[in-house]
Image: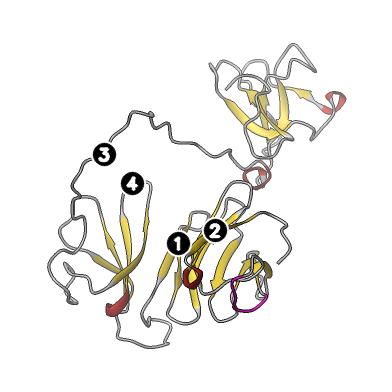
């Protein structure tokens, strides 16, 4: 990226190029300090004496590199912009699929699945499957012929090492952990880049959004009882949240997919 290019969802963040590097920089708050508060980098090493500062170019302030604050919470403040896949309009897909997990009949062996439900895929193409009737979460690395149980698999139950017909899963990349939707009134899970957790509740006919550590959440869709009106839901199931926090859901018993804009009245 080039000097001062926008590099985050947060419009206050910009790219500051590193000395001696071509199109390489840090993404940080461009309004964190004034020019008069900046100190020059060590002219020999381009290092900064403060551990939470980085040596960068800032030509609006000085002609020589300066030490600019890049605190530990910078990743949360300057969250990266989403990378949109560049799929050509003329792209085509294979007409036949390929089995990548299971395919050996229903059963509980580690090369089998039994009524699998939700799936997620890591960046390295490792596949995580909610193996519903086997009460477990099983992982299949790319090219593997057998899976590995990563949660549950200790019989049906509500113990901390057990699951009961898991329906859905997602990956929290911040903590590299799984969030599992076990059988009950909850069907769908989604998490956006701000780590808000969205949960569809098919008993209350609503979708709630939770901040990390929040036990109550707020209603972002539905919550007006079971029905067909545009402010109602009827067994909300799968969820998707886009970069603008619009919520999309499959409204199961109403036989349609709905979009609820951020801030829409429930």
Q: Secondary structure at mark 2?
A: strand
Residue designated by label 4: 124
Q: Does residue 261 show up magenta in the picture? A: no
Residue designated by label 2: 191
Residue designated by label 1: 170
Residue designated by label 3: 93
Classify 10 Å Cα crowding around label 4: few (below 14), some (14-19), many (20 and above).
few
Query: Are the residues at dot 1 and dot 4 in contact (C-beta closer than 8 Å)?
Result: no
Between the C-alphas of marks 3 and 1, the distance is 26 Å
- Earlier-in-chain disc, 3 versus 1: 3
Q: Nearer the viewer, mark 2 or mark 3?
A: 3
Q: Secondary structure at mark 3?
A: loop
- Earlier-in-chain disc, 3 versus 4: 3
Q: Nearer the viewer, mark 3 or mark 4?
A: 3
Q: Which residues are magenta?
A: 224-228
- The quadrant of the rendering that contains the N terminus is top right
Between the C-alphas of marks 3 and 4, the distance is 21 Å
Residue depicted at x 66% and y 23%: 56
Query: Are the residues at dot 4 and dot 2 in contact (C-beta closer than 8 Å)?
Result: no
Classify 10 Å Cα crowding around label 1: few (below 14), some (14-19), many (20 and above).
many
Classify 10 Å Cα crowding around label 2: few (below 14), some (14-19), many (20 and above).
many
Query: Are the residues at dot 2 and dot 1 in contact (C-beta closer than 8 Å)?
Result: yes
Q: Picture quarter containing residue 10?
A: top right
């Amino acid at each position: 990226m080039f000097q001062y290019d926008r590099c985050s969802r947060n419009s206050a963040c910009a790219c500051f190029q590193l000395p001696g590097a071509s199109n390489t920089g840090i993404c940080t708050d461009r309004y964190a300090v004034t020019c008069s508060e900046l100190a020059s980098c060590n002219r020999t090493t381009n290092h900064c004496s403060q551990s939470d500062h980085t040596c960068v170019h800032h030509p609006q302030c000085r002609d020589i590199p300066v030490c600019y604050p890049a605190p530990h919470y910078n990743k949360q403040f300057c969250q990266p912009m989403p990378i949109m896949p560049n799929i050509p309009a003329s792209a085509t897909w294979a007409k036949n699929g390929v089995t990548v997990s299971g395919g050996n009949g229903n059963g509980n062996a580690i090369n089998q699945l039994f009524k699998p439900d939700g799936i997620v895929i890591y960046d390295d193409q490792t596949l995580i499957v909610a193996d519903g009737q086997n009460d477990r979460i099983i992982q299949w690395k790319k090219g593997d012929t057998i899976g590995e149980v990563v949660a549950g698999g200790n019989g049906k139950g509500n113990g901390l090492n057990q699951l009961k017909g898991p329906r859905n899963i997602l990956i929290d990349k911040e903590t590299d952990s799984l969030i599992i939707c076990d059988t009950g009134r909850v069907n769908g899970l989604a998490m956006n880049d701000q780590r808000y957790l969205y949960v569809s509740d098919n008993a209350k006919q609503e979708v709630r959004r939770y901040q990390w550590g929040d036990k109550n959440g707020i209603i972002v869709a539905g919550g007006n009882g079971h029905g067909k009106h545009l402010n109602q839901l009827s067994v909300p199931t799968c969820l998707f949240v886009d970069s603008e926090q619009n919520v999309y859901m499959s409204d199961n018993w109403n036989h349609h997919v709905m979009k609820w804009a951020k801030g829409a009245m429930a």
